[in-house]
Amino acid sequence: MHLSPPPSGRRMLLAAAVAAATALVATGPVAAEPLTQPATDRQEQYAAAAAEYGVPQSVLLGVSYLESRWDTHPGQPSTSGGYGPMHLTDAQHVLSTPASGHVDEDEDPRGDDSRPLTLDPAIASAPAEDVLPQASLQTVDAAAALTGLAEETLRTDAAANIRGGAALLASYQKDLGAPVGAGTDPAAWYGAVARYSGADTEDAAAAFADEVYDQLGLGATRTTDDGQRVTLAATTVTPDQSGLHKLGLRRAERPDGLECPVRLACEWIPAPYEQLSADPGDYGNHDLGNRPAQQKIEYIVIHDTEGYFRPSVDLVKRADYLGWHYTLRSVDGYVAQHIKAKDVGWHAGNWYVNAKSIGLEHEGFAGHGTWYTEAMYRASAKLVRHLALRFQIPLDRQHIIGHDNVPGTTAGTVAGMHWDPGPYWDWSHYFDLMKAPFHSTGTPHTGLVTIDPDFATNQPAFTGCNQQPPGVPKPTPPAAPCPLRGSSAVILRTAPSATAPLVNDLGLRPNGTPDTMYISDHGARASAGQTYALADIQGDWTAIWYLNQKAWFYNPASAPTAKWANGFVVTPRDGKTTIPVYGRAYPERAAYPAGVPYQTISPLQYSLSAGQRYAVGGVLPGEYYRAVTFDGSAPGDWTVIRGENRYVQIQFGHRVMFVNLDDVQVLPASVGAPA
């Protein structure tokens, strides 16, 4: 939703970052001799760097795990501009990466026909006061000065990057006047670990350090994105937290009523609810509500900001913009809450979903070469689990959805719906962190399949990264290839063959041509955790029912990209050749009281044909939350209108959609499943 600062602001920030890095070097680096025989095994590289710079190996491994899970992301920075296993940051990259305007021209993020909202995209171009916490901007410069290695080497070579991270940790430890040495007690390194986070608040730095020390107690073993096996042996450590207060970080505001779990670094930065003119219908940037007492919260919607943290927060503080509930920062997982859960944000572009959801914006870019940090994944998972338990929201992909899973409200809005957080968001790892992992609950005979490719090795050949803002692409000439990287998405084809055309999404391409591999063209993709009705199996290929057609994905038994599942499906009632599909579950006309305009039950351009089956995500009442004035003065304002009709949420395509319960049969998925 946000744009980067103007070039003059970038230069000022970069100059400040370099000055901060120079000051850091001047505090007294740890002397280091270059390694005479560079280690080739990743585990050995951590051991060698720890010995060289006098850092306990467990601390070095723990910090690296919290930054990157030991992955290299070769040559690709995180949203925070961090490179390699130790996330050495380079402001030059961050401040030169363009942000995308996440609100398109003539877009209505509120998504309510009764009170359309059109925002001026130029609002997002207002200068921002900051992009990242000062301490995190340019650690690659300090690492270069401490190690004598070139910045480019530190960014691209994993062993060098680990050495740079070890040198920084040791220098932070020395600055605190604490002992340095590979044999020192890991408990004494808490302050240095907290500083490594780059956080600008004490609670955020502490939250990062707490995660590191929790990980030391748990241990870890995994294979990295470049095939290296790394192990952190579990060791219980009770950290000495006294060094934290020596860092001189500010303490964030945490008022009573803040809706965050206790150990999450969280601050209240409110979004304004203000009337903008004498017209009571002219107000922003969210709506008052009384959830869940008045209306159940069904969804948590995962977004990315398409911009940096500080500009995003600056925008949500504007009454003439739009509001969401939380913003999460990449570098350290810091959380800002803007709207209380009881109130309704304007974030998903679908009023039915907005009225029943909480929106989380994550600093990041769906289609850039950047990656989402482990610190942000962990903070987000803690927050979502907390909210889900509080509001009884199921921890599954029918209720924890991406913005890319939100349907259009009418046929005319389908093509303009957003596609963040995109195919590079690691849904499987995210749900692991929420303690709700995807697992098999059935067999090929139970009729459902849950998408779950191996994120690291699943690397679809997308195109067009960094080339266009969000929206349906029509690239001319053909878009350049994106860097190959891990993805949650599997590609769907019209036949069980890698050379078959991709399936067609009529909402994106009404002429019936196949969808493409362009990064934002999600009409031929299924994503990790999404569950579909099984349509067929041929050899290594599995077909699902998807947008009124069979869609095939590669799913070999030797390296499966999905898990068998059990549950329920819908199919058209006997005698119905096709049934309509909807993007919102609104009540019938008779349910509306006098003076309240009827909200049309408008079908989308899709249909569901007899003989097809779609996975059930829940049965919902027809509801419409009426909110069109600042003071609730319009007839029926601030009430939930409910009707007699009920809807079934289904996984119809990449997005969830709805069918009228009267049009379908709900059956166990095993009944009539392909043999």
Image (cartoon, rainbow, N blue to C red):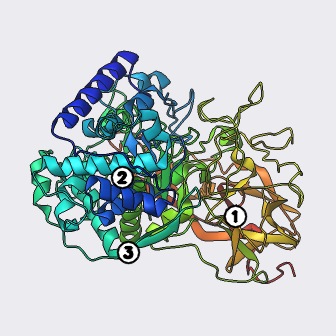
Residues 643 and 9: in front is 9
Q: Counting residues from the N terminus, which is met first, the one under dot 3 or under dot 2?
A: 3
Dot 3 corresponds to which residue? Answer: 233
Q: Is residue 288 above or below residue 496?
A: above
Q: Nearer the viewer, residue 526 or 613?
A: 526
Residue name at image x 60 percent, y 44 percent: 419
Q: Are marks 2 and 1 in contact (CB under 8 Å)?
A: no
Q: CA distance from mark 3 to mark 1?
A: 53 Å
Q: CA distance from mark 3 to mark 2?
A: 45 Å
**Where is mark 2, residue-wise?**
343
**SS at mark 1 in the image:** strand
Kindly identify the residue that appears in the image at 72 percent across and 60 percent down. Answer: 652
Q: Secondary structure at mark 2?
A: loop
The relative height of residue 8 versus residue 308 in the rendered view (above or below) is above
Q: Is residue 418 visible?
A: yes
For badge 3, the amino acid type reads Ala
Expressed as whole percent of the image width and height from the top left, the position of residue 103 reads 52, 33
Q: Secondary structure at mark 3?
A: loop
